[in-house]
Amino acid sequence: MSTPPRLRFAPSPTGDLHVGGARTALFNWLYARHNGGQFLLRIEDTDRARSTDESTRAIFDGLNWLGLTWDEEVVYQGANLARHQADALRLLENGSAYRCFCTPAELDERRKEAEARKDAFRYDRRCDRLDPAEVERRVAAGVPHVLRFRVPDGSTEWDDMVHGRIAFPNKDIEDFVILRSDSTPIYNMAVVSDDIAMRITIVMRGDDHISNTPKQILLYSALGSPLPRFAHLPMIHGTDGKKLSKRHGATAVGDYQHLGILPSAMRNFLALLGWSPGGDLEVMMLDELVERFGEDGLLKKAAVFDPKKLEWMNGQHLSILPVEDVAQWVMPALIAAGLATASELAERHDWFILLLELLRVRSRTIDDVVRQARPFLVEEITYDPDATAKQWKDAAHTITLLSETRDRLEALSDWSPEPMEEALRELAESHGITAGKLFQPMRVALTGLAVSPGIFDVLVMLGKERSLARLEAAVASLERGQTD
Ligand code: GLU
């Protein structure tokens, strides 16, 4: 059996955890879990000016919310500076790199000259041609310099797990800097040094990194380390075909958390941004994602982030997940909305679970559930003006219907759907109207809303006393409206 793969997610903590980063994290995690490997987290905080603790926290929070746990202690890239430097010096010692004394001003000037000639600027290796004694003299004199990697002739190629064979002619890669004059490593040097130290076997990341890969491969070879496999995941576009950005609305994972999306739906949705299990299968719980996720399903073409599909997916998950799992996400939302306290919900847990069963199949987001739960949790309801305009058009007639409904329901000794239905159908018939014509205005009276669970379920969940009180309040409100 081959050794289990080791993968990592290596975000730079310079902002929120965005959809693209979360997708990359998820794919690495799923691949590791599917293959019995490890998923590691490395915070690439070497850009001191742009990295913040707040972003690091946002990354942890986002990954935790998504349930993407990492297997070993978090690696902070900045803590590995000494090793990055040692690896760069190893390259100098083994002849793969050389010292370059050209100043930024000189390089700038040569760049401008090249541009004026309409040539692409590439470092001309002049410091590689310096006499060794001269190099020694300058080093001894403390002349500032960088270390440059000497790119060999030939071509750098790899079999990408997403794109297949990719080849870069080395002549297109300039002798790139690996260590700056202040002895800090350049990005590619730090990444390769860390990936080697972390024994990463698969580097899976966004395909905006493809152009870094040949440089990284050259570094691996020069350091004498085995190459990992590379997978470059497709970019994520908005529904307009443009690269996903703030213009497309919420792109941070935390935003979706606050918009009432379930982590399981978000995972499922993100999993399909660049991967397909084949066939029409879309709605998958975590176990199924782990079971099916493999490199065969990795897709090349840009993925489309469609918020409507995410909402649909969320609706599916709301309906399918074990109701107690859904409750775990809905309860804090109800409490935050001030509709109930934790102890109230705990006291009426069975009732609450029944209510949730009724509401979740009619909801796409947790916010939808909260909206629909309101009339069942609060004393006073408000009437949706659109609903009253439509269902209480004829006030006098509605008053009669609702008053008689109240009286018939009050007379019931058994507060259950069957006798309710019998009584209300009879009432509708006596007025020569369909049951629907009675249930619609009743629904508004009982919930204030135009949509709700079936009317008998509403009555049962509210209980007799509260149902009768709501019908009376609706009648009173209609009567007030008539005299206003
Ligand atoms: N820190 C890089 C980024 O956030 C990722 C580097 C990598 O995955 O190799 O884009």
Image (spheres, grey):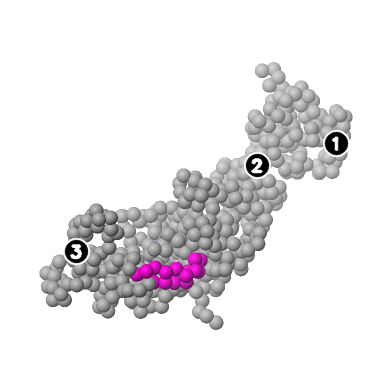
What residue would you read off at disc 2? Answer: 372
Quadrant of image for the N terminus: bottom right
Q: Identify which amino acid the numbered label 2 is placed on.
A: Gln
- Assess disc 1: are there few (<14), some (14-19) or many (≥20) residues with their C-alpha within 10 Å of its C-alpha: some
Q: Residue 164 lies in magenta, yes or no?
A: yes
In the rendering, at what x and y percent does residue 454 appear? Answer: 75, 42
Q: How many numbered discs sit on the rendered protein?
A: 3
Q: Identify which amino acid the numbered label 3 is placed on.
A: Cys
Point out the tag, 1 or 3, that comes first from the N-terminus. 3
Residue at image coords 56%, 49%: 306
Q: Identify which amino acid the numbered label 1 is placed on.
A: Arg
Q: Which residues are magenta?
A: 156-170
Q: Residue furthest front?
A: 117
How far is disc 1 from disc 3 in space, using C-alphas? 92 Å
Quadrant of image for the C terminus: top right
Q: Secondary structure at mark 2?
A: helix
* Residue 162 against residue 240 in the figure, above or below: below
Examine the rendering and report whether any part of residue 115 can be seen.
Answer: yes
How far is disc 3 from disc 2 in space, using C-alphas? 68 Å
Residue at image coords 67%, 56%: 320
